[in-house]
Amino acid sequence: MTWEMAVTGIVILAMMGALIKEAARPEFILLAALSVLLLTGILTPKEAVQGFYNQGMLTIGLLCIVAGAVQKSGLVEKFVEKVLNNGHTPRQSLLRIMVPSSIFSGVLNNTPIVAAFTPYVRQWCEKHDVAPSKFLLPISFATIAGGTMTLIGTSTNLVVHGMLIERGFQGFSFFQLAVIGLPITLFLILFMISFGLKMLPNRVPLMPYFNGEKHQKRFSAEMIVEETGDFAEKTVKQAGLHQKNGTELLGIVRNGKVIEDYSPSFKLQAGDGLLLIGSLNEIAALEAQEGLHLDTGAPYQLDGLRQGESQLLEVVVTHYSSLLFKKMKDILFPQQFDAAIVGVHRYDDQLVQRMEEITIKPGDTLLLLAGPDFEKRSSARNEFTILQTKRNNNPFQPFPMWKRILPIVLLGIMVVLAASQVVSIFSAAAVTVGLLLMLNILPIREMKNYVPFQVLIVISAAFGIGEAMLKTGAATYLAETMLHWMAPFGLIGIFILLYVLTNILTEVITNNAAAIIMLPVAIESAAILGIPITPLAVIVAIAASASFITPIGYQTNLFVYGQGGYRFVDFMKVGIPVSLMVMVLTVSITWFVWI
């Protein structure tokens, strides 16, 4: 083992550890790893930046713009609402929503699809007295599976495609992966409407607007004790804050320090901060008492909500938001968005921190008091998904009908041209974006808001890391080790191990990083075995996308995690059998088609 190989291995292990621990935003972690490889001389400057002009990466950015234009039209949401309302039973409605979800995700980014579907699914479930936990996870799984049916269905497919072309191999054709993706999707839909509905919990989601006190989502909030009123110079017990039912006191802030170990006889003082957790109604009721006020750090208070001067919104922080891993005090939320953060909900966690010290993480639900300019400012950013707002409120300005329909027509033409191989998917996407710009359907100032720059940076940096694995021989070493372990089991054993390793990586780090780490191993394995690269590349692409076991492996899973009231074990209960069957289908079909 050379020193270059050892350094590359150490850098990749450190990178994976940082991603698992969420030490920083993914793009920062991968850029740091790439910088180390550059500074040590393992990569030349040209090799380090090659991912930043890779055709696969650029195609992802262009397709996100096209998907943004379709999303902006609002027609997808209208279609979903109609589909759900035509279903007469939960099983029928689930089937009616999973089929279009999987089809749409074959040509559109799946995260906006899930985000667009979720509010309508929750409204339908509340109307028909059905737990959304029966619907949201299957929708997420359907979009993941549907994305494997086409070249553009998921960024992972395009990343593997781009990396193959970069190394001089033939990439995937538009529908080449459908030979596996279609059976996977059909199996998943059948499994979810038969066994999945029974296996999923019948759990009412935690939502501030859901009928019934016991079902209300609990938010962390901070209130300040005023000099006058019913709380200053009173003990915790006298103030009625010692009880565990209703609003719960988690800690007291005094002189900048958080006191968690306090007794019922602890005396409150003016200026103390109370770290609380409770439902929206409970927090509002407590704030209405004389002597406390909600610390929002902005002009908006709950009184403004009661008087109609502001509106209450619930938003979910997206997986690649620029707000991630920043403390609230550093975000300047009121100045950026004309809104104040009232509370934070993070899965089942109780955040014993001052609001300003809370670090934003993917999937956090923020309860906002929004001012009149919030919709205008937030529509120009893709930081979070709005879940609760006035139903007739469109965050975008009204569109003429032709501008709503044309993006869908252009998307269809783009898919036909790319699928028939008249032009490459990159060229088709570039022309489509150019037409959207020329016709002013999506102006430049809006286009940039649909480009996931953080995702593109992750992919670009990961290309350099993959190059380091090939250049130093680290990929060869791993391939030889894998082949040695699985020699007694033949090629099928190698396929299974490659799938399992890739799938494990995608559950703990990003799917694109997992693909780029494992594809060099697949390339070297194919060279040693003397077989075409296609079957091994297909296995890496499918395994990197097939994240069903944990809510953190894929952004759509993370999105529905809190919205459906799921627990970690719910994903494992349904995801493990799904993952095993998907692996069996992938390996079997790969064997019969390409070997």
Image (cartoon, grey):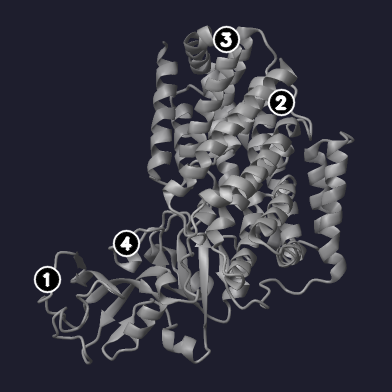
Q: Could you tell me if residue 41 is visible in this image?
A: yes
Against 223, residue 155 (above or below) is above
- Residue at position x 59%, y 16% from top? 492
SS under mark 3 = helix
Residue 585 appears left or right of 21: right
The amino acid pointed to by label 4 is Gln
Mark before the other along the chain sequence, 3 or 2:
2
- What separation in Å lies between label 1 and label 2 (alpha carbons)? 66 Å
Q: Are marks 1 and 2 in contact (CB under 8 Å)?
A: no
Residue with the mark numbered 1: 263
**Front position in the image: 431 or 513:** 513
Residue with the mark numbered 4: 350
- Residue 165: numbered disc: 2
- What separation in Å lies between label 4 and label 2 (alpha carbons)? 48 Å
- What separation in Å lies between label 3 and label 1 (alpha carbons)? 65 Å
How many other residues sit within 10 Å of disc 1, few (<14), some (14-19) or many (≥20)? few
- What separation in Å lies between label 4 and label 3 (alpha carbons)? 50 Å
- What separation in Å lies between label 1 and label 4 (alpha carbons)? 19 Å
The amino acid pointed to by label 2 is Ile
**Front position in the image: 260 or 322:** 260
- Residue at position x 84%, y 71% from top? 400
Nearer mark to the viewer, of 1 and 2: 1
